[in-house]
Amino acid sequence: MTSQPNTAAAGGTQIVGTPARPARPERPAGYWERVIRIVDQAPPLTDDQRARIRAAFHQPAAREAA
């Protein structure tokens, strides 16, 4: 028995997905504007915070798990 790919999407558009990863629904109106407004209000990162984030993404164990 073969399974059909998931092609259902919000708004009636056809997006081919897989059974393991269904199609994403559309974002509500103003979503990205709200995200940008929230990010713009946040204080800038300190040098220590930037270094910690970089170290987290450059660990060898993280690459192996991905």
Image: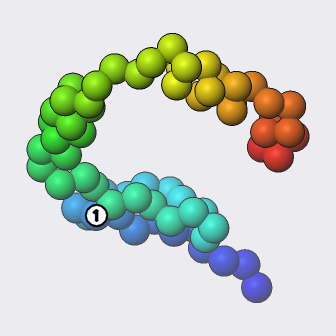
- Among all residues in the image, which is located at the extreme bottom? 1
| Residue at numbered disc 1 | 10
Q: Position of residue 62 (x, y in %)?
A: 79, 39
Please state the total of marks drawn on the protein image: 1
Neighbours of disc 1 within 10 Å: few (<14), some (14-19), many (20+): few
Instruction: Evaluate whether residue 58 shows in this view.
Output: yes
Taking depth in this image into account, of 12 and 44 the one nearest to the observer is 44
Q: Residue at x 34, y 20 (%)?
A: 44
36 to the left or right of 22 = left
Outermost residue toward the top in this view: 47
Image x and y of residue 24, in percent? 40, 58
Whether residue 12 sits left or right of residue 8 in the image: it is left
Q: Relative to 35, say whether 2 is above or below.
A: below
User: Front-most of 64 and 49?
Assistant: 49
Kindly indicate the quadrant of the structure image that contains residue 2: bottom right
Taking depth in this image into account, of 27 and 40 the one nearest to the observer is 40
Residue 1 locus on image (x, y percent)? 76, 85
Report if residue 32 is visible in the image.
no
Looking at the rendered structure, the kind of residue marked 1 is Ala
What residue is drawn where x is 40% and y is 68%?
8
- Residue 3's place in the image compared with 13, above or below, is below
Residue at 21% in and 37% down? 38
Q: Position of residue 52 (x, y in %)?
A: 62, 27
Which type of secondary structure does the marked residue at label 1 adopt?
helix
Q: Would residue 21 be found to the left or right of residue 35 on screen?
A: right
Q: Residue 18's image quarter?
A: bottom right
Q: Is residue 8 above or below residue 1?
A: above
The C terminus: image quadrant: top right
